[in-house]
Amino acid sequence: MRSTAKRIAVEGLGWILVLVGIAALVLPGPGLLALFAGVALLATQYEWAERRLEPVKKAALRTAADSVRTWPRIILSLLGVGWLVGAGIYWGISPAAPSWWPLDDTYWLMGGWGTGATLIGSGILAGAMVVYSFLNFREIKADQREDEATTPAGTA
């Protein structure tokens, strides 16, 4: 009975993370990370998910490394983080609708702090991922470039 409940909980959380990951691929948020986490959970229960885990992991790590490859990418990522957190705070405060808003004021920034907190949480998670990627992948890229520069072409 207990193992059945655990299996249902793991599968449920895995599928939720997969769906959130797919949505976050096009919406603000860490799509590949959530997708990887969901597939990793499902891989504990299903062989088909285990077979798909490695390609998702490689894509997530490649994206993380690419995100910190150049300083403009790092700066744009941090600006995106700031935008998400700022939008979340603005949304939570819920200022009055501007004069150009064509609908009733009740439809301006619906959701209040619930939506604002989600945006802030996404921003914090994205910022943590930028820092993680910078610390773990920026050094690797620099070391690889140095190795490539010192290795003569055609050897290795």
Image (cartoon, helix red, strand yellow):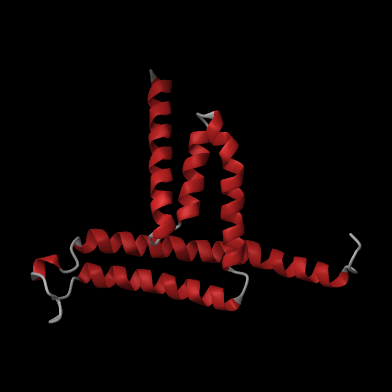
Name the foreground residue: 50 vs 134.
50
Left/right placement of residue 110 relative to residue 72 reads: left
Instruction: Count how many numbered circles sit on residues in the image.
Output: 0
Say which residue appears at 59% left-offset and 69% top-offset: 68
> Relative to 86, is 106 on the left or the right?
left
Front residue (pair 70, 100): 100
Is residue 71 depicted above or below 27 in this figure? below
Along the line of sight, the residue nearer the viewer: 51 or 139? 51
Query: Which quadrant of the figure has residue 117?
Result: bottom left
Q: Residue at x 34, y 64 (%)?
A: 120
Where does residue 34 sit, x and y in percent of width and height?
46, 49
Q: Position of residue 75 (x, y in %)?
A: 52, 77
Above or below, comparing residue 37 to residue 143 in the picture = above
Quarter of the image containing the C terminus? bottom right
Q: Position of residue 11 (x, y in %)?
A: 42, 33
On screen, residue 129 above or below 81: above
Q: Residue furthest top?
A: 1
Q: Position of residue 48 (x, y in %)?
A: 54, 32
Which of these two is toward me, 95 or 102? 102
Left-right relation of 156 to 116 = right
Q: In which quadrant of the rendered view does residue 118 lie?
A: bottom left
Q: Quadrant of the N terminus?
A: top left
Question: Please, which residue is most extreme toward the left here?
Answer: 104
**Residue at 26% in and 73% down:** 90
